[in-house]
Amino acid sequence: MILYKHLLSTLVAIIVFGGSVFANDLLAPDSVLVYNEKIVIVENGDAEVTVTVHVAATEPGTYIVPLNSQKAQNVTQVTRSPVQISVVEDRGVKFLGVTFPEDPAGINEPIVLTYNLPGFYVYEKQRKDNLGRIRFSYTFDNTVPANIKEYMLTVLFIDPYNVHFVGELTNIVRGRSSSFDAINVITDHDLGKRGFRVIKEDLAYRKSSSIRVELVARSVSVLFLLALLAFGAWAVFYYRDHLEDTGEERQLVKGLE
Amino acid sequence: MAENQNNMSQGDFEEMLDLEKARLSEIKEKKLTKTDRWLNYLGFPLGIIIFALIFFMPTPDGLMVSGQIVLACFALALTWWLTEPLPTHVTSMVLICLLIVLGGWDEKNVLGVLGLDVIWLNIGAFILCSVLVVSGVAKRVAMILILKYGKGAMSAVFAFFLVQLVLAPLIPATAARTVMTLPLMLLVAAIFGSTGGNPNNFGRFLLLHNLHGISIFSSAFITGSTCNIIAAGLIFVMSGERIFYTDWMFGALPVAILMMLASWWIGGKLIFRMSEKESKPQVSGGKEALKKELDKMGPWTFTEKKAGVIFIVVILLWVTDRWHMPVLGFEISLIVTALIGAAIALWPKAGIINWNKADVPWHLLIFSAGAYAGGLALNATDAARWIVSMGFDRLDLVGRQPNFWVVYTIIVAFMAYAGYFFTSKTMRTLIFIPFVVILAQELGYNPVWLALPGAFTLCWVIGLPFNAKPNLILYATGQFSVMDNFYYGFVVKTIGIILLVIFGMTWFRILGITPPFGF
């Protein structure tokens, strides 16, 4: 579902900004040096998103960068900087507007902001929708006519969920589908959560980064562990007569007599 | 009198040469040593403990949960395959079940492994092998071989050394070479008193030395295996350095020959030391009796000629695969060629055998399927790549900046020994070569200096029965155990690594494969 929404927003962006001319004196940057999204999903399915964006500018003005979640709430700038960031809207589509002061020379630092996404990912709903499998998909679209030099997405799930599988879940014998980006499974030791990270370089205008993973709740089943150990212990007892010498030796020893 | 006691009677001898009775599809009862019994006994709980440790540990960074599950299942199976508390095919069945039930890999994919090309190749290969046995061609050629070169065990095995060396550049498919020579191996082993039910050291030595020959001689030629071609391609794409046929051959062939000579001497003289009895053909009357037996067979029969023609057609199709498309307008793959040969051999009236005579060891195919499912699942879940990257990270070669020859030795050894944990040379190539090229670039070396000597080890899949197709086919004969395979393979691989280091410091420098003198 989330995938469709993103596809729709991409389509809207392409139709609306086909000519890449923005209203309200909004400017498209030459390039976005860094765009990091860190999505931390909490128990009730809401997400806390931290975005780190680095836009270099030579002229004052408001430069737009993509805001991937149109339902972002409580957008707050975390870093103190002469550069101000806010949500701007152009023809019904929300962007992040990075406003540089009169003289942007010497300002060359990333800006960090946070926002909330209510009801972003509800595990039980996903389980019902996907016939018991918990799948998570996410697509980031570059809707601004500027190259993003490095895009990084970090998603952290609630404990004990972890990435079980990546990408297409069938036909892996012949290789994974190339339409999904490679991910790296990670643990955030500060938050004690598991998740994944995707890094993509040179994400051009109208290009997107897509991932799809299947999740699983990792929990230690004490019963399973005990059953395994009991099985091993049973074998040690049951096959003890296997050690008895039957008088038959293999040629490896016998042949040298 | 003493000779008569040591050697078998003529009746026993004929019985022994009748491979139709010693069918590969029948599992032979093995006689166990005390060590074997302890390994069997402790292997079972040991496998469970290793499984539990990996399965229940917190999922490490970089590894998916499915990868962790597959790793745990594969470690269990590997322990059981090595120590054999259960027959290897039963272990494979357990592995298949665990992969599916615990969610390591999709049921469709796991079960689909039985339909992979490698399984079909094995089926075709075993049918062709049956053709050579039933028609009598194998018996005749084996006796000619023994009469010519069979003064003793060492010379008989050396004859196979030469056969494998000649076949390697002609037939790139290792499975094909195995099928061609397997009936001869079995007959010669039988003449020296080694059968699947009662193997002796000659049988172990002969079969495993051939296995070494099939794999190691493949490493000598760029066309010896698909993985060599892929490795050369990757080196070219990633570094711009083109590897020519002669670059590869001049570098790898001397190493392969010396490695095989070492395998021949160490195998026969140290690892599988043979008693005086085992070193000679065990037939009453010695060579004279063999000659009489050959004379008794008379001239080549019509069935033998027919089998010979089928086999020659199959070999021709294998050897000429690159010209199929321009000449025929379509390509006949290695596997389809084997199946065409099998279909002709099974053809009613015009063929040579019927299905009941085709000796297809299904227990071995189940073993293969389990091993391949485990290997493919390791790859699909990225667990194989994770192990390799973890290994490189732990070594921290970029951070430590050691001497070039330390890096060289580590890379060559790492790539050679990693063969124990893979079921596919191609997968190993695709995982390792990019790592090594990038590492070399980060260290400021020409990528060829590390990647090409490393690539020479890709075909050294001589460690375990599931590491390659020839291993599986030869393991089915019951002439050697998993531990025999492991131990002999380990010793020969280690010698190969030492040779690569010595050559790297000398001959490869002249060829430009490693840094020039004075670097």
Image (spheres, rainbow, N blue to C red):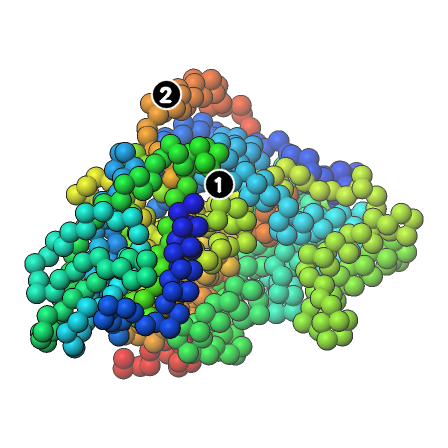
The mark found on residue A223 in the picture is: 2
Q: Amino acid at mark 1?
A: Trp
Give the residue at x 27% y 82%: B518
The mark found on residue B272 in the picture is: none
In the rendered image, the quadrant that contains the C terminus of chain B is: bottom left
In the rendered image, the quadrant that contains the N terminus of chain B is: top right
The image quarter in which residue A180 lies: bottom left
Give left or right: position of B206 versus A189: right
Give left or right: position of A219 versus B103: left
Q: Which residue is mark 1?
A: B105
Pointer 1 chain: B
User: Are the numbered discs 2 and 1 placed on the same chain, yes or no?
Assistant: no
Give the residue at x 77% y 59%: B311
Task: Name the spot of residue B455 as percent of width and height, x first.
Answer: 45, 66
Give left or right: position of B469 versus A61: right
| Res. A180 in view | yes
Q: Nearer the viewer, residue B416 or A136?
A: A136
Q: Amino acid at mark 2?
A: Leu
| Res. B185 in view | no
User: Dot 2 surroundings within 10 Å: few (below 14), some, or many (20 or more)?
Assistant: few
Task: Name the spot of residue B215 as percent of width and height, x first.
Answer: 55, 59
- Element at label 1: loop
Q: Nearer the viewer, residue A138 or A239?
A: A138
Q: In the rendered image of this protein, does residue A241 appear above or below residue B391?
A: above
